[in-house]
Image (cartoon, rainbow, N blue to C red):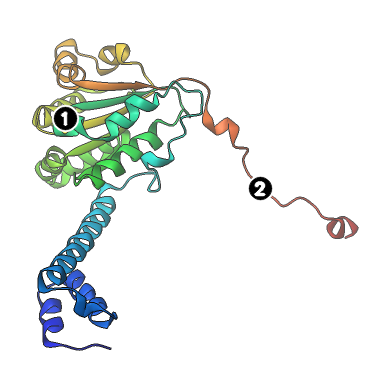
Amino acid sequence: MLTHPTLDQMQTLGLAGMAAAYRQLAEQDGQSDLNRDEWLGLMLDREMAVRADKRLTNRLAAAKLRHGDACIENIDFAAKRGLDRRSTLQLAQGAWLKAHDNLIISGQTGTGKTWLSCAFGRQAARQDYSVLYVRVPRLFEDLAMARLDGRFPRVIDKLARVQLLILDDWGTHGLNDQQRHDLLEIFEERYRRKSTLITAQLPVAQWHDMIGQATVADAILDRIVHNAHRIALEGESLRKRKPAPPLTEPETRETNRK
């Protein structure tokens, strides 16, 4: 194994990518054909790639995506659910994130809203945005608990700072006064500063009634809807196409004899 003071210094400085590239170049035949600038360029490229991979791994771990394997490349555009390839791939380029716009994915249960939101979440992490996925019912539980144990300001700050907040299962039930004001505070902090992705079975036209209390509902929707891109999924549940595995193995002839 190659040992060299330069390698030790790289490791000490946390330049693992450069150290790996240095070791690989030194062990290759014909490495003398490269000049110093080419050596340095290759090592820097490797270091940047290693850091980018590590940063993506950390962002995905922090995102807590429900479908960790979801990605834009695996979207099924052949399924009849009204998902337009051109507009979806355009959204995947991330201009809406740079503009601090929102994205609303609506549709009946089983049409793939959550999976698609996680695919956009992974894509955002690839583009070096911080991401956090949370189900809205669980969010309200966490906020209520945080209010009791004194963590509420820190939780709100975390929700306000993340660059893409994914709110899944929006509008599954009506809101009480505290939940309405919590949402208003979150969206007020994020408005025109960060992007929010919302998935909902309930059509946007019914959100006002779901939120309740007209004044607060107007304020919340004003901060969500007017600068939001929309994807409306149609069709029946995709889960119906995948038969559930049997709970028990089918009986064999040997079993029947017994």
User: Which disc number belongs to residue 182?
Assistant: 1
Residue 68 in the image, given as x and y percentages of width and height: 37, 48
Question: Is residue 63 among what the camera can see?
Answer: yes
User: Looking at the picture, which amino acid does disc 2 mark?
Assistant: Leu
Q: Specify the farthest residue to the front.
A: 33
Depth order, front residue of 165/232: 232
The residue wearing badge 2 is: 247
User: Looking at the picture, which amino acid does disc 1 mark?
Assistant: Asp
Q: Image height check: is 220 above or below 57?
A: above
Q: How crowded is mark 1: few (under 14 residues within 10 Å), some or many (20 or more)?
A: some
Q: Quadrant of the N terminus?
A: bottom left
The residue drawn where x is 40% and y is 48% is: 69
The residue drawn where x is 15% and y is 16% is: 222
Marks 1 and 2 close (CB-CB < 8 Å):
no
Question: Closer to the observer: label 1 or label 2?
Answer: 2
Residue 232 in the image, given as x and y percentages of width and height: 37, 20
Q: Residues within 10 Å of mark 2 (few under 14, many from 20)?
A: few
Say what secondary structure mark 2 lies in: loop
Q: In which quarter of the image is the C terminus?
A: bottom right
Q: Distance between the residues labelled 1 and 2?
A: 43 Å
- Which callout, 1 or 2, points at the residue further toward the start of the chain? 1
Residue 63 in the image, given as x and y percentages of width and height: 26, 47
Residue 155 in the image, given as x and y percentages of width and height: 15, 43
The residue drawn where x is 37% and y is 44% is: 66
Say what secondary structure mark 1 lies in: helix
